[in-house]
Image (tube, rainbow, N blue to C red):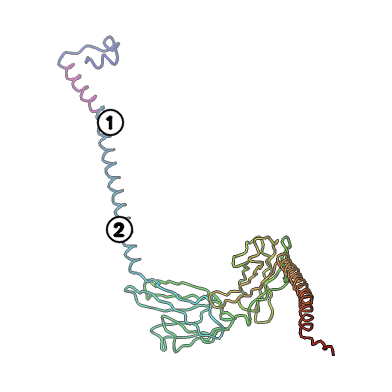
Amino acid sequence: MCALDVDRDPYSQHQLPHHNNKAEHHHCSHHRQLTVEQQAPPSSGTRKSSSTGCGAGRRTSNLQLWYILHVILVLIDISSSLTMTEVKIPNHIMRLKSATLGCRYALDGESLYSVKWYKDGHEIYRYVPRDKPPGQAFPLPGVNIDLRNSSDTQIVLRRVTLQSSGLYRCEVSGEAPAFNTVSESETMTVVVTPNHGPKITGGQPRYQIGDTVRVNCTSSPSKPACQLNWFINGEPVQKMHLRHFDKIVVNRDGLEMSRLGLEFRVRAYHFKHGDMKLKCVAKISSLYLQSNEESVESDRQQRAPALESRETVAAKSSTIGAATSKIPSQIVSVIAPLLLLLLFHNWTWPSKS
């Protein structure tokens, strides 16, 4: 019996029959071989798991390579695709003027399929190079397209009206198979300017320190409504002193009037050399700018100098009057004796006969 068996089962020596030494040696050798083989799988399993890890690493590397390749292809596709370079739409334009709306793009190797223009979601113009003629306009209220001066890069609207205001969008599409499409949009507003400048109402010609100023500024009808701003002595008014009112629609064309109130308590610093200037400015983008200014006098500072000047004039006039009244009496008192002396000296007395 081999030592390994003895170690496993100490009682097996008394239960099993004895064999010769040769057979016993063969049995022990065979048993050790089996034992080694039984202990081998863990090491072989370790080698298997290691090879499995290497395979997973290779698959991960392959996925990463495929991902990087895909990103590169996408970037190449993007860099060579259709792009919009510029959309130029006027934000404001005067009524009855012509408006030019521009749309520029880069094909980057693609072929142009079409250029389309939309107003508030409605198609108004289409340019297809293969069509004859390539340009085509679609009727819409407020839109009058000049086909002769319109192309794939611009459209011209003649004599715009208030109905021409809206959201305009340019859409450019490439040819098959990609049919890449790009678009951009801008809002255009048709402007009707006021006939005259803003009006200031509610003010007094004079104010005292501590009085409350309540004035309103009203713009003339326009489209869109004017933006109003108040200034005191050239300085913008703080928001806490402003009084906002709703816009007023005055006719069927939708012309609007704006009104902005100003309310504040008069302080000494409001008067510059006894004068306070209230100014209202009406503005529409960069197309219209008008203002109205009123000068307000200080009641206290204006009356005091006036009274003082009257008293001074009265004092001066009384002094001059008194002086003039005293001069003749003094002259008479001096001249009268002189005249009497001259008469007495030149008088010829009659001689005694």
* Amino acid type of the residue that numbered disc 1 sits on in the rendered structure: Pro
Is residue 145 magenta-colored?
no
Residue that appears at 18% across and 21% down: 29
Quadrant housing the N terminus: top left
Residue at x-position 79% and y-position 82%: 344
Classify residue 347 as left or right of residue 60.
Answer: right
- Residue occupying the far left of the picture: 22
Within-10-Å neighbours for mark 1: few <14, some 14–19, many 20+: few
Write the start and end of the magenta stretch as one range.
Answer: 23-37
Question: Which mark, by number, is residue 42?
Answer: 1
Q: Nearer the viewer, residue 172 or 277?
A: 277
Residue nearest the observer in this picture, 12 or 299 = 299
Please say if 21 is above or below 261. above
Of residues 21 and 250, which is closer to you in this image?
250
The correct choice, above or below, for 205 with respect to 127 in the image is above
Disc 2 crowd rating (10 Å Cα; few below 14, some 14-19, many 20+) is: few
Report, in whole angstroms, how far the alpha carbon at label 2 lies from the one at label 1.
40 Å
Quarter of the figure with residue 208: bottom right
User: Does label 2 or label 1 sit earlier along the sequence?
Assistant: 1
Q: Position of residue 240 (x, y in %)?
A: 66, 60
Q: Amino acid at mark 2?
A: Leu
Give the image location of residue 96, x and y in percent. 55, 86
Residue 184 in percent (x, y) is at 46, 72
Which mark's residue is nearer the viewer, 2 or 1? Answer: 2
Q: For numbered disc 1, what is the local secondary structure?
A: helix
In x, y percent, where is residue 33?
A: 20, 25
Does the magenta stretch mainly form a helix, a strand or a loop?
helix
The label shown at residue 69 is 2
Residue in the image at 74% along x and 62% along y: 211
